[in-house]
Image (cartoon, rainbow, N blue to C red):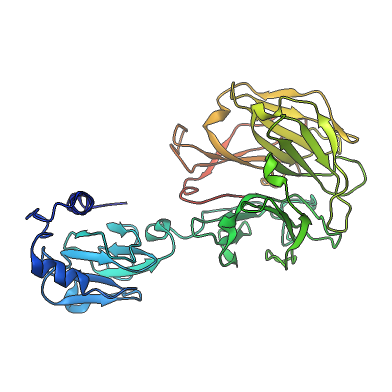
Amino acid sequence: MRISPLRRLATLATTLGLTSLGLLGAGAAPAQAAISDCPAGYFCAWKTMDGTGTMFKTNTNKATLGSWDNTFQSVVNRTSEFACLHDEPNYERTVGVSVWDPDPAGTEWGHSDPTVSSVSLVPTARECNFPAYPEWYTSAAPQASGFGDLNADLQADVLVRDKAGRLWFLRGDGSGQLVGKSGWNAMNALVRHGDFSGDGREDVIAREASTGKLWLYPGAGNGSLGTRKLIGNGGWNAMSRVVSYGDLSGDGRSDVLAVEKATGKLWLYPGTGTGTLAARKLIGNSGWNGMSALVGAGDMNGDGRADLIARQASTGQLWLYPGKAGALGSRVLIGNSGWNVMDSFLGLGDVTGDGRADLVAITKSSYRGESCRGVGCLLVYPGRGNGTLGSRAETAGDWFALNGFL
């Protein structure tokens, strides 16, 4: 994101009330009058450094600028979207792009480099430089795993939430489909792992931040979601982690695990197969608050039962808890250290197409890899079918500036 130093000065001057800062033109009456002429809901620009003279305005995308090409000097963004100022026509994202945050009140204005040739208005800052959703490619699995495949095409897929609260379905071929237009930022937990409603389709479970309610969103079988159903009246904000696990109870139905904040206890909520959860059962007495990530990863050790992967916050170690009938077995160390550089983990079944469950991770800024560094690297750790992981593959580098994955 490129932000002009003069814009930063303009913001500081406005904040401090320095109305006589001649460099910015903020103290001159004509400049203030011209800036205030920009209507609410519009992006506006001027050919002068002090925001006077003829004004350009738009509330739609402009692929070319005609006589305004390469002339913007002062700008203000009074829309509710991010304004992307592209150095090339037709919203070219591979060369210079500057980003202006939404400012409906018009309190922040500043200067632009006079190199702008097109303007786009987008819901998230990411979209000024990248598609709304990241790259996701997978290989077809030899058989269905029962989870990680919302459209049942044998390719592991992902749901991605963006900063605007939209939900995107990534089917594994590089494409993305909008399946939730807005409102998903109201959820502080989003999980999926198999069929909870009993219709043979994978579903999504979400916790509502403001109420602590738990909602089931039934899968439609094509990547989209149906009308939600309440499955937890309240109190779920008492849980530090909610995990959609798969079948732990041994009845063939998908279950939910949750860690209680106050006690660090781990609870099993058995699925009923009708879109509800049965009475909970204690399966971990304490200590589970020491885990900074829990993943229902599927059958990692080849015994036919779903397993749990956990990251220990204090050491960065990765542990496998093998699933037993209604309980978890003794843990096995599968990652010695260094796993704290991962921001998120995903258990999506077979990603590589070899019939074994794999582990997917998205990195933090501290990550240093062979071909990708920093935040937003997508890593695939192939499962070997014996509870261990193979060497990672860095498969993408654009999994950043987003707001959750499942």
The percent position of residue 141, horizontal first and vertical second, equals: 73, 51
Q: Is residue 311 left or right of residue 372?
A: right
Instruction: Please state which of residues 279 and 189 is positioned toward the viewer in this rendering.
Output: 279
Question: Which residue is the extreme one toward the right?
Answer: 251
- State the image coordinates of residue 309 (x, y, percent, origin top left): 71, 33
- Which one is in front, 225 or 63? 225
Residue pictured at 83% horizontal, 27% vertical: 329
- Residue 384 visible in this rendered orientation of the protein: no
Report whether 64 appears left or right of 337: left
Residue 123, image quadrant? bottom left
User: Is 267 located above or below residue 54 in the figure?
Assistant: above
- Residue 220 at x, y = what percent? 74, 67
The percent coordinates of residue 131 (x first, y second) are: 46, 60
Residue occupying image coordinates x 42% and y 60%: 127
Name the residue: 19% across, 54% down.
Answer: 10
Horizontal relation, residue 367 to residue 183: left or right = left
Q: Quadrant of residue 45?
A: bottom left
On the image, which quarter does residue 270 sit in? top right
